[in-house]
Image (cartoon, rainbow, N blue to C red):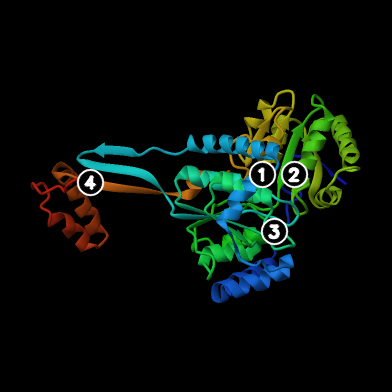
Amino acid sequence: MLSRVDLRGVADISGRLPRPEPVSEGSVVAVREIIDAVRSEGDAALARYTEQFDGVIPAAWQVPSTEVAAARGRIDSDLRSALETAADSIAEFHQGHVSQEQVHNRQGITIRSWDQPVGRAGCYVPGGRAVYPSTVLMTALPARAAGVDEVVLCMPPDSDGRVADVTLAAAAIAGVDEVYAVGGAQAVAAMAYGTESIGAVDVIVGPGNVYVAIAKQLVAGVVGVPAAFAGPSEVVVVADGTVPVEYAAIDLIVQAEHGPDGLAWLITWDPDAADSVEKAVAELLSDAARRDDIAATFDRSGHIVLVDGPQAAAEVVDFIAPEHLQVMTQAPGAVISRVRNAGAIFRGPLAPASIGDYVAGPSHVLPTNGTARFAGALSVRDFTKPMHEITVDSEGLAAVGPHVAAIAEAEGLDAHAQSVRLRGIGDKVQEGSDDE
């Protein structure tokens, strides 16, 4: 079930490690076809693809705001309390990462810089195999903390054409403005280009299957899309013989139960630990509620990697660049201090990735498919754009004007040089007024 890769004594690991299959060209072509259809046909294409992929056409794409608000009172009180507690933690974390305005002065030039939130953000929440109220919180609340005016949510409808009460309740708790019962690549296209029923957004965020992730890549440039490929879930567990084997085993299973196409790896330098964890995985899997999904992930990309020690373990981690990294060893810092590529790191035996999935605070929307090499968790920065204004006084113009002219002339841009000369380099000029 979990295949073995023995890297002990191997200097060059790059040719010995399995890698996730690249996105197929056929998948890209299929998603592009969906996007083009939604762009040209609008709601008609949404209906066609939603019926094809979800087996239903909702009575209306938008869930009434009264229905969203009422769902908060319809769910179990303990569940509502859990969602509200998670929301508080997520909101507090992201509000602490909102940047402050910066002012820089140098030689008569004043630069004021700030992060400007986008006007309208689209959050995608997956469905089908499960409901994900946590993803509602993990996408909408960072947008709210960033100061976005309107937050839109899209998710696949259930077999009755509805959205689950628990998901709607999370939307109410997070202060979502609009909820739409549409999923898949067609939802991404609708948010990017707009349809008769769904207004276009400025940014699209959120995880999904490979088709949703491809769709976001294809509309990037039309709308803002984070650099991370937020696709099927991944986990790498680094463990030695000092951790209870059940901890390592269940944490491999946790991310695998999201379904196929993910990744679940154990890295260890202790052969006995490898054997014990594999046995514990088999025992836990025997009565797991989502046994088929877990087994499919393990069969496709479940591996146990034997290495020489902590440094070698970190090298394997960096090569994979996993979404979730859990380090449960006697000295976790010996591994973590050497790791450069990971979406989120969970340190020690009492920090399973499920804590990060729900209540720790940082968003659980993380880079997959190797994109942790250059991207990180969803944050308030994904909902803002840097802006600045420049004010120049007479001293500043006198100080930099000759340099502007010299560089402009070297580039053959005479008008650029003239723009400072016309203002009389070094002369007293009106410096502008403050409107506020």
- Residue under the image location 58 percent in, 60 percent down: 217
x, y percent for residue 27: 69, 66
- Front position among marks 4 and 3: 4
- The residue that label 4 is drawn on is 391
Q: Nearer the viewer, residue 208 or 133?
A: 133
* Marks 1 and 3 in Cβ contact (< 8 Å): no
Of residues 178 and 254, the one drawn nearer to the viewer in this rendering? 178
Residue on which the image places disc 2: 255
First of labels 3, 2 by sequence position: 3
Residue 273 drawn above or below residue 145: above
- Residue appearing at x 62%, y 73% in the figure: 45
The image shows residue 405, relative to residue 283, as above or below, that is below
Residue 138 screen position, x and y as percent:
59, 44
- Residue beneath label 3, please? 22
- The disc labelled 1 sits on which kind of residue? Glu
Please identify, in this view, whether the residue under mark 1 or under mark 3 is nearer the observer.
1
Q: Does dot 3 land on a helix, a strand or a loop?
A: loop
SS label for mark 1: loop
- Quadrant of the image containing the C terminus: top left
Q: Are marks 1 and 2 in contact (CB under 8 Å)?
A: yes
